[in-house]
Image: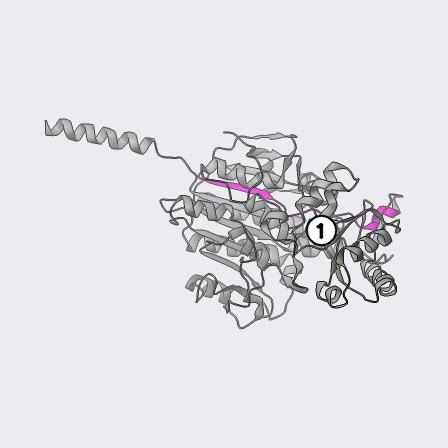
Amino acid sequence: MKKLLFLVAGLLMAAAAGAQIQRPKLVVGLVVDQMRWDYLYYYYDEYGNDGLRRLLDHGFSFENTHINYAPTVTAIGHSSIFTGSVPAITGIAGNYFYQDDKSVYCCEDRTVKSVGSDSREGQMSPRRMLTSTIGDELQTATDFRSKVIGVALKDRASILPAGHAADGAYWWDTSAGHFVTSTFYMDKLPQWVEDFNRKNHTAPRFDIKGSTQGVTMTFKMAEAALKNERLGKGKETDMLTVSVSSTDIIGHKYSTRGEENHAVYMQLDRDLAQFLKALDQEVGEGNYLLFLTADHGAAHNYNYMREHRIPAGGWDYKQTVTGLNAYLQGKFGISPVMSEDNYQIYFNDSLIAAAGKKKQEVIDESVDWLKKDPQFLYVFDEEKVTGTTMPEWIKERMENGYFRGRSGEIGVVTRPQFFGGKDDPAFRGTQHGQPFPYDTHIPFLLYGWHVKHGSTNTETHIVDIAPTVCAMLHIQMPNGCIGTARYTY
């Protein structure tokens, strides 16, 4: 009888084990800053077999993935990828934005201290982000037994993807020449990070972010985190978020074409191949789920476009602010425009109130004045965008990109290929931030665990990435998510 009971108990235990939710050992979220979708194919013939082509040739590609908000900038992109949400909900309204008439940085947090240096570059946290991330939901699903780590050169590209409940987020302190974190996460760097910094550092203030060395350093740090934190080797699924920042810095300076852009994408391909090899060795091929995407794209340089008779140019936003303030000074006796940022005009509420003026009247006059400028396709009061006459797809992106109290009061849409910056015949670089395809069309590739080779041209959005990954993990999507799961295995 005892033998029978033991046999039944064993069968029940085996059945229970077989019924457990199947998840990968590790999820890797890889963001390539400023990677236009077409870079997948523009350089395809030059990529090796083990990097980007491995993902394309063996993974699943969502070929028609677009950002469904504007402005399209780094902080917003990274937060939206991992929250499945938009600025209207996350509160991340830009890299910089205004609160209470003061300019703030998206991750700035003076309540925490730098860990690993004495610099203010470490005084960062995700506290301004109001929603959870994939990593946060993974933590709650496993009662915080999972490990979640973020790595990037840019602080915002490490902090926002990793989320609030991350075990660690590491970014590059240029003033120190190595990786740091903040007391939001820990009071002391782990020994492995200190060891890494001793072996891998630069002279203080060296611009590693603007060099191909930055790509290699990012992947080396990601591999060190993989090995030393033993990610993917525990009982629960772990997560590693990695963002490559140098592609953006180099793109801004040298644009979308030329030897500099070519060099950084060749370096990306080589370093990605090495990183995939490390994942295979440490976690096992087929045991990890990796997704690759971008936070935004980029416009081609306007001088390059005009050489080929394609309309393009620069919008001198500083000149617009100066002109608008001069007009309002004559009309109301005040110059209330603080700045233009994110293709939005910000007003000083305190100055308007102190002058006894009605803010709505100031906004209305400003909209009418700006509409006379032929550089703009559309100018609108952000609070009244739903009633503005413009294509619905632009209107939706403007609505999704607006957060009251952090976004500007007036939004503008320039003509396509006309981006913020002085029009200079010697300018070689580029910008991003607009609702047009060159800024919104991004790659989205799934690779690894339970992913079959294939592709789709079905319209997909940046906010669909998080719910897709969460659905594959059988966990709840982030709490501000507005996207839809797009992959079934």
Residue 298 falls inside the magenta stretch: yes
- Residue at x 69% of width, y 48% of height: 72
Pinpoint residue 248: horizontal percent, then vertical percent: 67, 53
Pinpoint residue 336: horizontal percent, then vertical percent: 78, 64
Viewer-proximal residue, 478 or 369? 369
Magenta stretch? 283-306
- Give the side of residue 164 with respect to residue 358, left or right: left
Vertical arrangement, residue 340 with respect to residue 86, above or below: below
Q: Residues within 10 Å of mark 1 (few under 14, many from 20)?
A: some
**Identity, as a three-letter code, of the amino acid under mark 1:** Asn
Tag 1 residue = 261
Residue reaching furthest to the front:
356
Dot 1 falls on a residue whose secondary structure is: helix
**Which corner quadrant holds the N terminus?**
top left
Pinpoint residue 231: horizontal percent, then vertical percent: 42, 49
Residue reaching furthest to the bottom:
118
Pinpoint residue 293: horizontal percent, then vertical percent: 61, 43
